[in-house]
Image: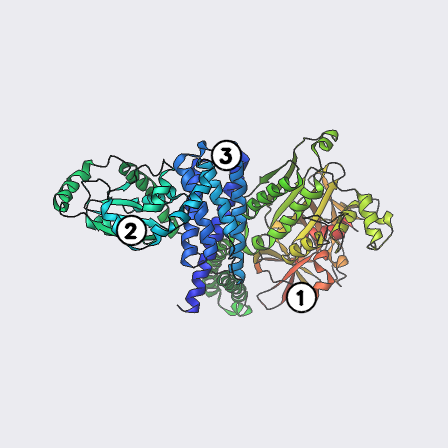
Amino acid sequence: MSSGMDSSILDTYLYEENNLLDQLDEMLVADEKNGDFSTDDVNEIFRIMHTIKGSSAMMEFNSISTIAHHIEDVFFYIRDKGIETLDPEHKKELFNLMFRSEDYLRSEIEKVEQGVPLSTDIDAFSNEINSFLKKISGAAPAQPEASQAAPAASGAPASGAPAPASAAPASLPDDKDAACFFHVFLEEGVGMENLRAYMIVNAVRECEVTFRFYPSDMETDPDTSQKIAENGFFLAFDSNEDASKAEGILKTQNHIRSYELVNVPKAAPPAKAEGKKASVSKPTAPAPASTDTAAGKAAPMLSHAPVKQNLISVNLMKLDSLMDIVGEIVITESMVTSSPELNLLPRDNRDNFMKSARQLRKLTNDLQDIAMSLRMVPISGVFQKMNRIVRDMKQSLGKDVRLTIVGEDTEVDKTIVDNIQDPIMHIVRNSMDHGIEETAQERIAAGKDPQGEIVLSASHTSSEVVISVKDDGYGMDPQKILEKARSKNMLTKPDSEYSQKEILGLIMLPGFSTNTEVTEYSGRGVGMDVVKKNVESLGGIVSVSSTYGEGTTISMKIPLTLAIVDGMKVTVGDSIFTIPIANIRQSFKVKADQVIKDEYGNEMVERVDHFYPIVRLHSFYHLPTEVTQMEDGILLWVEANDRSYCLFVDDLIGEQQVVVKPLPAFLSEFNLKDHGITGCTIMGDGNISIILDILSLYSIAVENA
């Protein structure tokens, strides 16, 4: 197999396994909250483990396929008997076992991703899963040792190859319709031979042939384990064609040491004829159940098939290239339509050209929307993983906390989803560890619900996604934060000059941690500074708000996509700025006497019964311009989130779609993001225009003025 083919198969394998484990995690967390597995989920977990077992065996990842196979055995039994047969204690144990199994499978798949050898020592965990199956299948306490000892004792006769061959004809079951039998021997020491044999029987049912199996009570009678371990079990078929179909299934089954086809001597022809007649009306014993269950299992699988055909997984690098090309098309289109040579054309020709150009603009818009939507995925995948973190920490910290998820259907760019998981996980852990109170009594004394709550929410504004993690715990004490920062020499000005917002911002400085001791989850000095860095690398900002005694909210605002925005170009002196259309409410002119000043001398203007501050862009960025009188320029009324104000600019040039280019890395040391600059764009004539960030511009120009 070529290495290219190899890697593409491996990529497909990893993609599929990770998806299945995410699905499993979601089901387990939801079921544990309800305190029970639903029947659908039992079937689904069985299917997931069956798939993982099969694909891992194909790839020869034995540790993964073996553990998945053992879990499949457990859920085969539960599916067969009904989840209601388990008592609450067993269910609780099963949840813990399943979470550990999921973690184990994940860690093995991570090893595959990193190219590290897989675990070879899996016996202890396998035995644990097997002993749980023995426990729930109602084997008597002495049974496990007996079944463990039995193979060893019976190993000698069973292992001799001639023994099954000679024993078989002598002990064929009494089945007068059978034309032939398969005599199957299991591997030594597999344990619970009756259930293993019954699983093989069920697998053979899937090829939809009529057959019987002996011992016929293997499923319900644990005592048949001993007989099967020593003498094997039989599958009886009405014809050799049926037997050869079944052989295809037998070859794929685990735990089979050997099997042989035994034809019924002499009486075979009449038996065959009878068998054919009987096969229509015969299925009395397990056969009807088998065909029903086979059909029942096959039906949902068939219904999923068309859906699968509608999905295609694409390498992200190809999508990145597509976005780059679409971006270049947008720039080139504006270069063509704004070319000065067009003014040399006769008027009729120019009108015709502009009509075609408008059609081209419409198509490029559609192309751009589709290209961007290809990269958009719901954030629910990341949010659901937080359920697991809260669940594990609840157990280890002994805190009663519920996680409430809001807006999980919010769609964001794939790169953002990949990079936002770690920051969210870190914040959720912080909230659990030292946000929520240690005991329920402490919460009750503070007049709160004894159960803590963490709210994880996502929402869209027109140009960004806002993700926030809110807890109703201790809240942050500004005084303690100041003291901690002072003790670490992090303060840059006197205490009294720090605003509440600036104090809370101190927790995002490198090396700052309010935890006094190192726990499993925090206090290692890898704190909010990492979160801030990760979010800023996506062009976003992190903000903290907290009320001491009531709780803390940490919000991350991230651009919806890192690609293309509709912008309004404005001039200030010789510079051209682009303001996202989504942030503009209105543009208007005012006379000087309509502008008033507050007690600090800051300019304000009235719109719709409210006064809004004015930010003069030429003053803020120290740009030379002749337009300094209010009457000569234009005011743009802008808003972002809940902030609203007016920008004073020289003039408007017009609306244009622009491709957002990140600022060059060498400019990052100047913290341009803190000064209202979010990126830049190349315009049709080749000039560069700065794109303004309306929210951060407000923060520095109005709030911190």
In the rendered image, the quadrant that contains the N terminus is: bottom left
The span from disc 1 to disc 2 (Cα, nearest Å) is 74 Å
The image's mark for residue 254 is none
Residue at the spot of label 2: 164
Q: Position of residue 225 (x, y in %)?
A: 37, 41
Q: Is residue 62 left or right of residue 340?
A: left
Q: Position of residue 105 (x, y in %)?
A: 51, 51
Residue 648 appears in the picture as rendered: yes
**Dot 2: element:** helix
Mark 2 or mark 3, which is nearer the start of the sequence? 3
Mark 2 or mark 1, which is nearer the start of the sequence? 2
Q: Looking at the picture, which amino acid does disc 1 mark?
A: Ala
Report the mark closest to the observer, 1 or 2.
Answer: 2
Q: Looking at the picture, which amino acid does disc 3 mark?
A: Asp
Residue at the spot of label 1: 665
The answer to which image quadrant residue 624 occupies is: bottom right
Q: Position of residue 159 (x, y in %)?
A: 35, 53
Is 567 in front, or is 116? Answer: 116
Does the residue at mark 1 contact the one at mark 3 (Cβ under 8 Å)? no
Does the residue at mark 1 contact the one at mark 2 (Cβ under 8 Å)? no
Q: Looking at the picture, which amino acid does disc 2 mark?
A: Pro
The answer to which image quadrant residue 401 occupies is: top right
Residue at the spot of label 3: 36
Mark 3 or mark 1, which is nearer the start of the sequence? 3
Is 267 in front, or is 415? Answer: 267
The span from disc 3 to disc 2 (Cα, nearest Å) is 44 Å
Residue 359 appears in the picture as rendered: no
The span from disc 1 to disc 3 (Cα, nearest Å) is 52 Å
